[in-house]
Amino acid sequence: MNCKKGGNAILKYDIEEILLASNANVGGPTTAAAMAIAKGWQDLIGPILVVGTLGYIIGNYVGTALGLWFSGLCKKREARIEFCGLFLFCKAVNISGISVN
């Protein structure tokens, strides 16, 4: 398979490992494990669960740290944080409390 040779030569990983890592990034370790089981890659189930769980652990701390950092930036500029869907906005507020933008 040409795709397998190209992935192995450039990244030194098998295409199965690349597909499972991509799946774990998008859907988490459980969907990656389900894909490994469905495809018959039994030897990759354990490692993908460990790596996906480590991604959850690291991602929670990094996300919390970034949230605290952004809130600190907004406080220094006399601003407030507003959540609009998935986006985070900082709006400057003047002394009277009226939003300036």
Image (cartoon, helix red, strand yellow):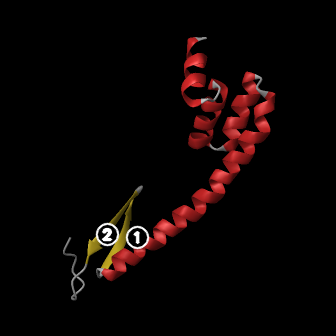
Residue 43, position as x, y percentages in the image? 80, 31
Q: Which is in the foreground here, disc 1 or disc 2?
A: 1
Position of the C terminus, as image quadrant, is bottom left
User: From the viewer's perspective, is residue 26 above or below residue 88?
Assistant: above
| Rendered location of residue 73, percent (x, y) | 36, 75
From mark 1 to mark 2, how far is it between C-alphas?
A: 9 Å
The residue lying furthest to the left in this view is: 100
Hey, which quadrant is residue 89 in on the image? bottom left
For disc 1, the marked residue is: 70
Q: Which of marks 1 and 2 is nearer the N terminus?
A: 1
The three-letter amino acid code for the residue at tag 1 is Phe
Instruction: Kindly check if marks 1 and 2 are in contact, taking CB atoms under 8 A apart as contact.
Output: yes
Q: Circle 2 — which element? A: strand
- Label 1: how many residues lie within 10 Å, few (<14), some (14-19) or many (20+)? some
Residue to which mark 2 is pinned: 90
Q: Element under label 1?
A: helix
Place of residue 76 in the rendered image (x, y in percent of width and height, measured from the top left): 33, 82
Q: In this view, does 2 lie above or below 79?
A: above
The numbered mark at residue 97 is none
Q: Please name the residue shown 29% across and 82% down the image.
A: 78
Q: Which residue appears at 22% of the width and 88% of the height?
A: 95
Question: Which residue does the image show at 77% across and 23% down from the upper left?
Answer: 40
Q: Where is residue 70 in the image (x, y as percent from the top left)?
A: 40, 70
